[in-house]
Amino acid sequence: MTQPLLKVDNLSKSFGGLAVISEVSFEVPAGGRLALIGPNGAGKTTMFNLLTGVYRQDVGTVTLDGEVIDAYPSRARIGLGMARSFQNIRLMPHLSVVENVMLGQQSRAKGWRDFISPVTAFGRSAAYREAEDLLAAMNIETRPGDVVATLPYGIRKKIEVVRALAAKPKLLLLDEPAAGLNAVETASLRDFLLQIADTGVTLLVVEHDMSLVRSLCTSTVVLNFGRKIYDGPVSKVHEDPQVLEAYLGPRHAGEKEPAHV
Amino acid sequence: MSGYWIGLITILSINVIFAYGIFLAVATGQLNLGGAGFQALGAYAAAYLAMEMDQPLVVTIAAGMIVAGVIGFAISFPILRLKGVYLVLGTFAFAEVVAGLILNSDALGGATGLPVPTFIDWDVPAIAAIVVALLVFWLMSTRFGLVVRSVHDDEVVADLMGVNVRMVRVCAFALGAALAGLSGALYAHAFSFVEIQVFNASLSIYVLLYVLLGGAQTAWGPLFGAAFFTLLPEALRDTLPALKEAVFGTLGIEGASNPPDESWRFVILGVATVLMMIFRPEGLITRTLVERLRPLNRAPRRAPAEAAE
Amino acid sequence: MLLLQQIANGLMLGSVYVTVAVAFTLTISILNFLNFTIPTLFMLAGMVGWSLAFWGLPFGLSGPLPWPLALAGGVVVAVIASLIVERFTFRYLKTRYGDSTEHAIPLVSSLGFLLILENLVRIEHGSDAQRFPGPSADLTLSLAGIHLRLPQVVSLVVVVFLVLGLVWMMKSSRIGRMLRAIAENPDAAGILGIETRRVVPIVFMLTGMLCGLAGALFAVNYGEVSPQMGEDIGSKAIAGMVVGGLGSLWGAVAGGVIIGLIEMMTIHWAGADTVQATVWGALLITLLLRPQGLFGHHAIGKGKL
């Protein structure tokens, strides 16, 4: 069995005595599409912050593509092949669309010469064209010079994902990509993400929208109060009594799970 | 060319370079309220080398840049650890300490100042200003410029994208300090005299304000800001008597005791600042404005799949 | 004996710094706003007081006013100016993007107002220092060989009561509780039913009163006012605030006194020219080594320093 792309091993994190993540372990195979779900406050975004190095775990290790990455500061992790998007869109408001995507290329910029050659002005540089091509390949319809603040929400969500893609990551962490999108936009997003997955990128998605989870992901890990309570195929998660109890309360253990959790 | 215009071009050039020096720090999100300190370092370095050590122009001006840049680099490490209000105070304190040290240094002339041999005419500062402006435009168009603007907008995300936020801030600050030093060295030779009273807190305030007025999002901002500030007295020359009469008339104040005309310029700078912060805090020239004026905002690229349909 | 005298003088000087430092620290801790207009308000009170005592009311409404009335007028003008500053700076803070420089919008506006007020005064009265016609008798107390001029003692007493009053107000009064709630979390304060828009001007009113009072005390104690007096006091007050600790009332007191003492010692041992470097040097070192000062809280500004 080939090694998994991402291996989270016995991760724990407390903030001032409150355990936010407790002894969580799971794996994501290369090319896989895993959903990280759970009720609000279960620790999903904290998990992302641990993986990207924004927080330092108290116990446990994270291994990416065979290499233990705990010693790397947050700044270095994107260079290891892990890029993320954010729950509240965090694009640079005063940069244009293309410039935002070019920021994603930053971890691939090598050497000082790369740093001081013009990328955004007279004549389009290779980096600029690459960013434009990526946007086009992802069917993002905007003028490349548009300053981000003027664009609609759904498009900005996609641009943020494209920015993460510009780093050519092996693993893409998506934090609630469908938040704030209606059904039509969510379907469009699903196709968008499947297209990305087809290129070989592994997806780890935090989501509340179960229809997106079911149509996009193959397996899922469920967190509740910082602990893992389910780790398996998406198709079976609605049958699991512990999951039902977590979402619906002890009395509803026999009911069907809701569409939106 | 008349002496008046020569003087104006000289001052404008020096102010443009000074503005770019402060701009580089502000572009990364650090408000540098200590500009006068770095300008003083450059001015006095040049003055001292010219006066006491008979160095040629090239050496003194280069030294002005280097001294200010190196000290800026060194001080940026501790100072840039401070955030927000503390950072502004730190830069302000730094400039005051520099001024205080020079004031008490007999070798540097103390309160009397230093004369500076080797006069330079308007062409040297003007050429320098053009070179510096081109340099900053180029710099802001590079990946470094991209990263600078990212750090300003969202340093947490910039860090997660792989940017060394600390080093970007330090480099921008130090480079800005060097430019401020350059403006000081040019000042020293253009005016043949340096005295520390010139490089005061008010000067730091003026330059920061006109950089913010012009706009710190693009390299056009400092040009406009410096031009506004420098040419304001010129614009006022015709309207000032009428303005004075109007204001005094309304306030009914009698016997205004010889108001220094200089002061009106600062009142207007102050009013412009207050208004700008209310209506358009990003400054006059913003990224959006530049984009809209750009003739080549191309049509969206059609994806290959769509084209095939 | 001379040393004790110097210490006494330092304390007197410090009391002026304390008042202005308290104004700074109140504004910063409650509103996260470094208000650069504060030294200008101090100067305004002094200059307007002098103008009223020398010329009388504008539009020729009266002859020269007696000095207590003139100073009261100065304080009133300072308060009005402070409220105008509130109306045009702080009211307009809009955090749209959350980027690094947004917190500084009111700060920059206050710099603008500094220029406006200071230069309007210069235009009206020129740049020279003016003698303030204070109390005529030179009343001096002698305490254990130290000479204390009566105005200085009065200043000290006034300042002590003022600070105690402020501390009491912040701790125990309804207004104080509201102000502390706003300092803690401005958004939550709104939800709790505190009308921020009505309460914030109170801070500015206090600022105007404190600075006005400090200016009046200064004019009486030193008999001299000038358009430059704000810069000098401002730097010492800011240094006092930082050394004592941003956000702490008692810190402002301690800091103001310390700076006053440092100033006196420096003048005594190294001459007046070194005061600027020493005071600002103390500030810089505090910022670099222990930014929270002696008594300050480490996180100023609601998470976004």
Image (cartoon, rainbow, N blue to C red):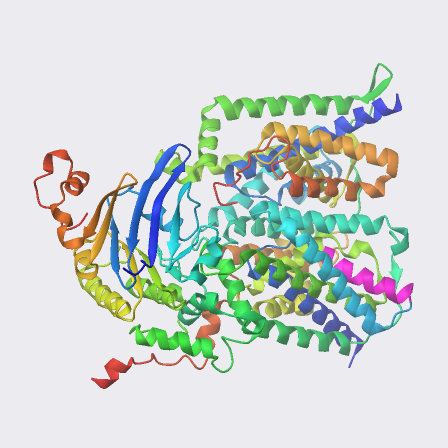
Q: Name the residue at 64% across, 36% down.
A: C241
* C25 or B265, nearer to the observer: C25
**Does the magenta-highlighted stretch encompass residue C303?**
no
Q: Residue furthest front?
A: A1
Residue C70 can be seen in this image: no
Q: Name the residue at 28% across, 42% down.
A: A42
Residue A50 location, x and y as percent?
39, 48
Residue A48 location, x and y as percent?
36, 51
Q: Name the residue at 51% across, 26% down.
A: C170
Q: Is residue B258 left or right of residue A45?
A: right
Q: Is residue B59 left or right of residue B171?
A: right
Q: Is residue C113 left or right of residue C233?
A: left
Residue A221 location, x and y as percent?
24, 49
User: Quarter of the image containing the N terminus of chain B?
Assistant: bottom right
Q: Which image quadrant is residue A177 in?
A: bottom left
Residue C28 can be seen in this image: yes
User: Quarter of the image containing the C terminus of chain B?
Assistant: bottom left
Q: Residue furthest bottom?
A: B308
**Which SS type dominates the magenta stretch?**
helix
* C267 or C176, nearer to the observer: C267
Q: Which region is colored magenta?
A: B36-53
**Does the magenta-highlighted stretch encompass residue B39?**
yes
Question: Is residue B50 shown above or below C164?
Answer: below
Q: Name the residue at 61% across, 25% down.
A: C163
Question: Is residue C127 shown above or below C70?
Answer: below
